[in-house]
Structures are given as structure tokens and as C-alpha cells.
Image (cartoon, grey):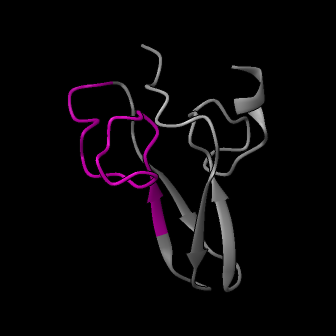
Amino acid sequence: MSDPVVAQTAPYAVDVEEGKNYFWCACGKSNTQPFCDGSHKGTDFAPVKYTAEKDGKAFFCGCKMSGKAPLCDGSHSRI
């Protein structure tokens, strides 16, 4: 498996809606970051489904290195 592209070295703060599904880009190639646009086709990557548990802000990983994907765990501070 190849390494993902670092889309940005900070999380994406996104307003999410309770019960709504979001598909986080794991490959880093999407033009609609932090969400999947299908750019992973032909790679070993697949989008990660996230269902919001409540309305509010969610911080999606931008560096694609989070151990809590799709959410940020601070891994970007080590790049």
C-alpha cells in the first residue's frame, strides 16, 4: 500500500448534522477535501464513513495520518 497524500497539515473543521453520513478521503487526492470525490479509484485506499453523533463541529484529519481516522488526533504536529 502506498502512502496517502498530505492534503493539509491541520484538521478540517466541519459543521456536521446528527445522523448524517460523511465519507472522509483517506488517499488525500480528493478535490473536495476532507471528503471523498472518487480520486482513490485505482489505489488501495477507500473512503472512511463517519456518521455524526450530534450536530456541531467535527475536526476531520487533513494529514491522513490520524490513528483515529477520520477524525484528527494531532498526528499533523509530528510531520
Give percent across and percent down for residue 20. 51, 80
Quadrant in the rendering for residue 54: bottom right
Magenta-drawn stretch contains 39: yes
Residue beneath the point at 44% across and 58% down: 23
User: In this image, 77 relative to 49: left or right?
Assistant: right
Tell me the chief SS of the magenta region: loop
Q: Quarter-wise, where is residue 74 in the image?
A: top right
How many numbered badges does the structure rendering display?
A: 0
Q: Nearer the viewer, residue 8 or 35?
A: 8
Which residue occupies 46% across, 36% down? 7
Whether 70 is drawn above or below 65: the answer is below
Place of residue 12 in the rendered image (x, y in percent of width and height, measured from the top left)? 58, 55
Q: Which one is in front, 61 or 46?
A: 61
Q: Nearer the viewer, residue 19 or 33?
A: 33
Tell me the quadrant of the picture where the C terminus can be found. top right
Q: Is residue 23 above or below residue 74?
A: below
| Residue 60 in picture, x, y percent from top left | 61, 54
Identify which residue is drawn at 39% across, 40% down: 46
Residue at the image position 60 percent from the left and 49 percent from the top = 70
Q: Which residues are magenta?
A: 22-43
- Residue furthest left as drawn: 42
Q: Position of residue 57 (x, y in %)?
A: 68, 73
In which quadrant is the N terminus drawn?
top left
Is 2 situated above or below 45?
above
